[in-house]
Image (tube, helix red, strand yellow):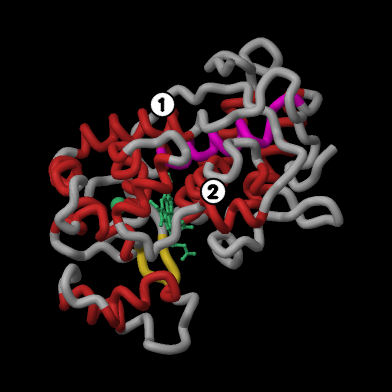
C-alpha cells in the first residue's frame, strides 16, 4: 500500500522540507533528534502509525499525550507543527499526512545524529481518534523483564531481533530519574556498582524525579555504546539491562556491542517494520490540516 515515491509527483519538495526543519531543530538542540525518534515509536505502538499521539484532548478525543509513558515526557510536538506548516506551504495545500511526517522526521533525526539511513515507505493517513488507555496498555514500561518485552513487541508483529535492534534507539537521548530510580537503588545483581553510585549522584532517593541521565554515554551520537554498556551491566533502565541478563537476547546484544555496521543495518530494517504497523491507507482516515486536531 505504501511506496517510497508517494509524494514525488504531488509534492516533490515535501521530503527535503522535512529534512531541513529536522536538521535545524537538531542543530539547535541535539536531544530533539532523540525526542522525534521516540514520538514515532509511541505513535506506532498505539493502534499503528497514524499520528494519534499528536491529537490534543477534546470532548471526543481521548488524548494520548497525558498517558503515563507520554505525560511530561514525550516532546518535539512544536517541531512537528513547524514541519507541517512549512510542508503545507511548500506543497501549496495539505497533502502530506502527519503520520508520514513522524516517520520521515524519525529517519532524518537518526541521520542527523550520524546513524544509518533508509527509505521511508509513504502514504500513511491520519487517524480521527486517539486512545489514552491503549497508550497506557501498549507502550512498554521501563520496569519490564525480557519475557514481557518480547510479548509486548510480539503483539505489534515485531520479533526478538526487532526488540533488540529497536531498543538500540537508546543510543540517543535521556531518561528521567523516576524511570531508573528503582534500578540504581534496589537492584544489586545485574548492575555495575560504580555506575549505580554515579547515577545516584544526580538521582536522589526522593525528589529530583525529572533529573536527567543519558541513556548511553554518547546521547547525541548513534553508536554501539548502548550495547557495550549493557554487556558491562551499565544499562540505565531495567528494561535495557533485561536484554542482557542471561536470556536469549544476550548473543545479539554482544554482536551489536562490537559491530556498529550490523546494528545499523538491523536498526534500519526494524524501523521500516515498525513504521508499517497497522496503517491507514487509501481513503481511510484523513490528511490532517493541523496535526493537533481532526479536520
Ligand atoms: C523496549 C522497550 C522500551 C522501553 C521500556 C522504553 C522506555 C523509555 C523510557 C522510560 C525513556 C525515558 C523517558 C523519560 O524519562 O521521560 C525512553 C526514552 C527514549 N526512548 Fe525508549 N523505550 C523502549 C523502546 C524504544 C524504542 C523502540 C525507541 C525508538 C525506536 C525508543 C526511543 C527512545 C528515545 C530516543 C528516548 C530518549 C528521548 C529523549 O531524550 O527525549 N525507545 N524510553
Ligand atoms: Ca550513543
Compared to residue 119, the image places residue 191 above or below, namely: below
Look at the image and tell me whether residue 27 can be seen: no
Mark sitting earlier along the chain (1/2): 2
Identify the element where label 2 is drawn.
helix
Image vertical order of residue 227 relative to residue 285, above or below: below
Left/right placement of residue 230 relative to residue 115 reads left
**Residue hosting label 2:** 42
Q: In front of the other: label 1 or label 2?
A: 2
Q: Nearer the viewer, residue 95 or 53?
A: 53
Seen at 59% across and 53% down, the residue is 135
Q: Where is residue 253 in the image (x, y as percent from the top left)?
A: 19, 46
Q: Name the residue under label 1.
A: 118
Horizontal arrangement in the rendering, residue 79 relative to residue 55 (left or right): left
In which quadrant of the rendered view does residue 91 lie?
A: top right
Report the quarter where the N terminus lies: top right
Disc 2 crowd rating (10 Å Cα; few below 14, some 14-19, many 20+) is many
Say above or below: 150 vs 197. Answer: above
Q: Nearer the viewer, residue 124 or 91?
A: 124
Residue 29 is situated, as x and y percent measured from the top left of the image, at: 50, 56
The region drawn magenta spans: 95-110
Amino acid at each position: 500500500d505504501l511506496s517510497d515515491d508517494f509524494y514525488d509527483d504531488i509534492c516533490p519538495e515535501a521530503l527535503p522540507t522535512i529534512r531541513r526543519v529536522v536538521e535545524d531543530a537538531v542543530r539547535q538542540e541535539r536531544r530533539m533528534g532523540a525526542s522525534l525518534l521516540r514520538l514515532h515509536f509511541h505513535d506506532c505502538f498505539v493502534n499503528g502509525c497514524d499520528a494519534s499521539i499528536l491529537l490534543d484532548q477534546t470532548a471526543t478525543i481521548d488524548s494520548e499525550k497525558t498517558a503515563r509513558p507520554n505525560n511530561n515526557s514525550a516532546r518535539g510536538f512544536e517541531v512537528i507543527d513547524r514541519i507541517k506548516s512549512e510542508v503545507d506551504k511548500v506543497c501549496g495545500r495539505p497533502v502530506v499526512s502527519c503520520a508520514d511526517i513522524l516517520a520521515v522526521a524519525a529517519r532524518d533525526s537518526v541521520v542527523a545524529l550520524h546513524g544509518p539511513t533508509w527509505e521511508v515507505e509513504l502514504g500513511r493517513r491520519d487517524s480521527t481518534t486517539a486512545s489514552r488507555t491503549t497508550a497506557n496498555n501498549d507502550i512498554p514500561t521501563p520496569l519490564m523483564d525480557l519475557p514481557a518485552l518480547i510479548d509486548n513487541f510480539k503483539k505489534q508483529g515485531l520479533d526478538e531481533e526487532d526488540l533488540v535492534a529497536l531498543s538500540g534507539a537508546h543510543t540517543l537521548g535521556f531518561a528521567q530519574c523516576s524511570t531508573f530510580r528503582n534500578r540504581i537503588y534496589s537492584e544489586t545483581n545485574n548492575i555495575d556498582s560504580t555506575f549505580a553510585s554515579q547515577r545516584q549522584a544526580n538521582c536522589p532517593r526522593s525528589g529530583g524525579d525529572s533529573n536527567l541521565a543519558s541513556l548511553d554515554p554518547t546521547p547525541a551520537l548513534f553508536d554501539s555504546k548502548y550495547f557495550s554498556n549493557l554487556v558491562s551491566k551499565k544499562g540505565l533502565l531495567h528494561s535495557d539491562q533485561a536484554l542482557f541478563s542471561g536470556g536469549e537476547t544476550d548473543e545479539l546484544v554482544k554482536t551489536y556491542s562490537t559491530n556498529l555496521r550490523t546494528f545499523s543495518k538491523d536498526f534500519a530494517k526494524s524501523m521500516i517494520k515498525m513504521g508499517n504497523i497497522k496503517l491507514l491507507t487509501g481513503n481511510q482516515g484523513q490528511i490532517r490540516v493541523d496535526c493537533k486536531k481532526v479536520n
